[in-house]
């Protein structure tokens, strides 16, 4: 892959920014309070019954049971279609980010949830956001998987817009529902995008080899 170094460099930058943000939140939390408070106050000002129902639906898609069921269906579908590298890429990213790294980082940074009214119940720590990380890792992985099979730039653009909106809505829902700071969402996005971008060149090369050998479609 011609752009392998580009993906690795970008991933490294994203993960370094994550480390810097986490360090700031843990040791200098007052520096991010104005940023967090401004966005939280704006999100809370939008609260209504209809908006709450809409965003609870989107945040529910990424709840552990729901997303695990979705992942199992997708992976089985990829295996049935003989998209073996795609199945490994999606499953590997999901397990690494949502199952391993995000829980570890929550423990390392030990940030409590925001004070105030929570419109959904949460018991874990706050930074980085598991919902934000999971939405990014799943939808960004799916973008790379499906965009490689789309023939036109316009279809790739439509796919990027749809999946990008899903990522943003899930992230915003966590702030709106009162269970995350905006910097938690940014942290989740940085973690997941960094991991997916780092893994992508390896997946792409392996996919090419399997298709060249006729071992997958």
Image: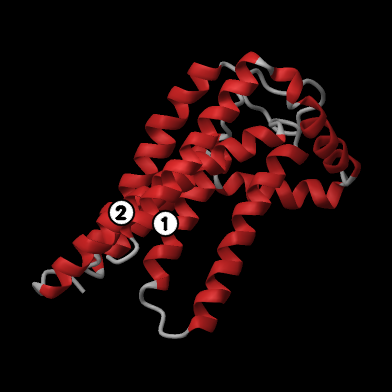
| Residue 31: x %, y % from top left | 74, 23
* 93 with respect to 176 (left or right): left
Its colouring scheme is: secondary structure
Other residues around mark 2 within 10 Å, as few (<14) / some (14–19) / many (≥20): many
Residue 117 visible here: yes
Task: Give the SS element for disc 1.
Answer: helix
Q: Are marks 2 and 1 in contact (CB under 8 Å)?
A: yes
Residue farthest to the bottom, as pictured: 152
Who's the residue at 42% across and 72% down the image? 147
Residue 73 visible here: no
Image quarter of residue 150: bottom left
Task: Give the SS element for disc 2.
Answer: helix
* Label 2 sits on residue: 89
| Residue 129: x %, y % from top left | 58, 34
From this view, report whether residue 214 is shown above or below residue 77.
below
Distance Cα–Cα, label 2 vs label 1: 7 Å
* Label 1 sits on residue: 141
């Amino acid at each position: 892959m011609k752009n392998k170094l580009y993906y690795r460099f970008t991933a490294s930058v994203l993960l370094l920014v994550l480390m810097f943000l986490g360090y700031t939140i843990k040791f200098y939390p007052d520096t991010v309070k104005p940023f967090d408070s401004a966005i939280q106050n704006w999100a809370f000002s939008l609260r209504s019954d209809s908006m709450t129902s809409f965003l609870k639906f989107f945040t529910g898609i990424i709840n552990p049971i729901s997303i695990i069921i979705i992942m199992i269906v997708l992976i089985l579908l990829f295996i049935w279609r003989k998209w073996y590298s795609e199945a490994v890429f999606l499953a590997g990213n999901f397990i690494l980010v949502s199952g391993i790294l995000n829980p570890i980082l929550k423990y390392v940074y030990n940030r409590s949830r925001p004070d105030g009214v929570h419109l959904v119940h949460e018991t874990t720590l706050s930074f980085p956001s598991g919902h934000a990380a999971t939405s990014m890792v799943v939808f960004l992985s799916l973008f790379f998987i499906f965009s490689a099979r789309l023939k036109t730039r316009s279809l790739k653009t439509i796919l990027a817009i749809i999946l990008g909106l899903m990522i943003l809505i899930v992230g915003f829902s966590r702030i709106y529902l009162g269970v995350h700071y905006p910097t938690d969402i940014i942290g989740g996005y940085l973690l997941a995008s960094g991991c997916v971008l780092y893994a992508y060149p390896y997946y792409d090369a392996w996919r090419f080899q399997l298709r060249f050998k006729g071992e997958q479609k």
